Amino acid sequence: MVKITTIIDADISHVDAIYKIERDSFIDPWEKTSIKKEISLNKLARYRVLLDDERVIGFYGIWLVLDECHIMNIAILKKERSKGNGSIMLEDLIRIARENGAKEISLEVSTKNLNAIKLYEKFGFKIISTRENYYRKENADAYNMQLIFKE
């Protein structure tokens, strides 16, 4: 059977799956109530889930503020990594940002997360600064990365 991978807007029915991925991916995960509020109440937020058939295997959340997009979180189930899913989600994220008038995308990423950094650089993101001890629970600095769209 052929698996069908799609990305759709997240809703309340996806909160448990997103929270599971969040816990699986980060030392200091967002609380389930925070994820639920982001999806249901935050008018600046846009959350999307990556589905493999009907199963949520990844998600991302962004804030769209005026002409800027900020990546709040992006994660994939550990067993679904290194299969191109990060690229699929980042392509969708960039498309959504552009469609909503963003001129740039920014994010913070742990300096220890080399796979994520390589992925962002592949899509043209540049390191613009370092934030010391940004991820306190993992004792890691963060790179502030940015992608500026050419006119």
Image (spheres, helix red, strand yellow):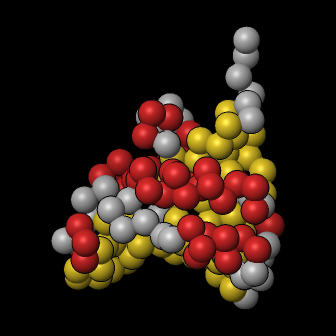
Q: Position of residue 117 (x, y in %)?
A: 37, 56
Which residue is located at x 25 percent, y 59 percent? 112
The answer to whether residue 34 is left or right of residue 1 is: left
Q: Which quadrant would residue 128 be assigned to in this image?
A: bottom left
Q: Position of residue 6 (x, y in %)?
A: 75, 40
Q: Nearer the viewer, residue 18 or 50?
A: 18
User: Residue, x 30% and y 79% (percent of image)?
Assistant: 134
Decide if residue 150 is in sight here: no
Q: Is residue 20 left or right of residue 55?
A: left
Q: Quadrant of residue 37?
A: bottom right
> Which image quarter holds the C terminus?
bottom right
Front residue of this view, candidates 39 and 9: 39
Please state which of residues 10 and 31 is positioned toward the viewer in this rendering.
31
Q: Position of residue 98 (x, y in %)?
A: 74, 67
Does residue 33 appear to the left or right of 144 in the view shown? right
The residue most toward the top is: 1
- Residue pictured at 72% horizontal, 82% vertical: 42
Relative height, residue 52 to residue 66 (above, below)? above
Q: Considering depth in this image, is 47 or 125 the residue closer to the camera?
A: 47
In the picture, the quarter occupied by the N terminus is top right
Q: Position of residue 54 (x, y in %)?
A: 74, 35
Q: Residue at x 23, y 67 (%)?
A: 138
Residue 28 visible within the image: yes
